[in-house]
Amino acid sequence: QVHLVESGGGLVQPGGSLRLSCAASGSIFSIDAMGWYRQAPGKQRELVATITSGGSTNYADSVKGRFTISRDNAKNTVYLQMNSLKPEDTAVYYCNLVQLGYIYWGQGTQVTVSS
């Protein structure tokens, strides 16, 4: 079993920054990719950013140039640096890990962008 723990969410004013972290533990053998998804009230969960074991990244168009995903392979941890936050970034952010064809999810962390 793989366990994901997210941290770093909170309340921030528009234009501000937050850094999310997600630490993976448990039966970690060979991570294919890790990433972040988000779900706003009344909306479907959507991809924010992903990073493969080789370091290739992919971003949603809505966050390109503002968010940066990175990964510490030694710590099995993925980060999401979020800058220039907008009210429309408000959502629950979920960490995701793909390993050997299985997909694991964290419990989510709330990000609220409001003045």
Image (spheres, grey):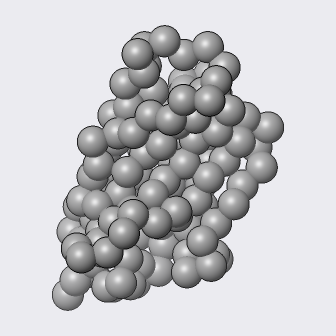
Query: With 114 as the anchor, is 3 left or right in this view?
Result: right
Give the residue at x 64% y 39%.
33
Quarter holding residue 114 = bottom left
Query: With 113 as the anchor, is 86 left or right in this view?
Result: right
Query: With 53 as the anchor, is 103 left or right in this view?
Result: left
Q: Position of residue 37 (x, y in %)?
A: 45, 58
Residue 28 position (above or below residue 21): above
Give the residue at x 79% y 37%.
54
Which of 67 and 36 lies nearest the eye of the viewer?
A: 36
Q: Position of residue 99 (x, y in %)?
A: 60, 27
Give the residue at x 46% y 66%.
46
Q: Position of residue 11 (x, y in %)?
A: 21, 68
Quarter holding residue 115 = bottom left
The answer to whether residue 16 shows anywhere in this view is no
* Quarter the N terminus occupies: top left
Which of 2 and 44 lies nearest the eye of the viewer?
A: 44
Residue 34 position (above or below residue 92): above
The answer to whether residue 5 shows anywhere in this view is yes
Which of 67 and 54 lies nearest the eye of the viewer?
A: 54
Q: Position of residue 8 (x, y in %)?
A: 32, 50
Give the residue at x 71% y 42%.
52
Q: How many marks do you count on the picture?
A: 0
Residue 108 position (above or below residue 82): above
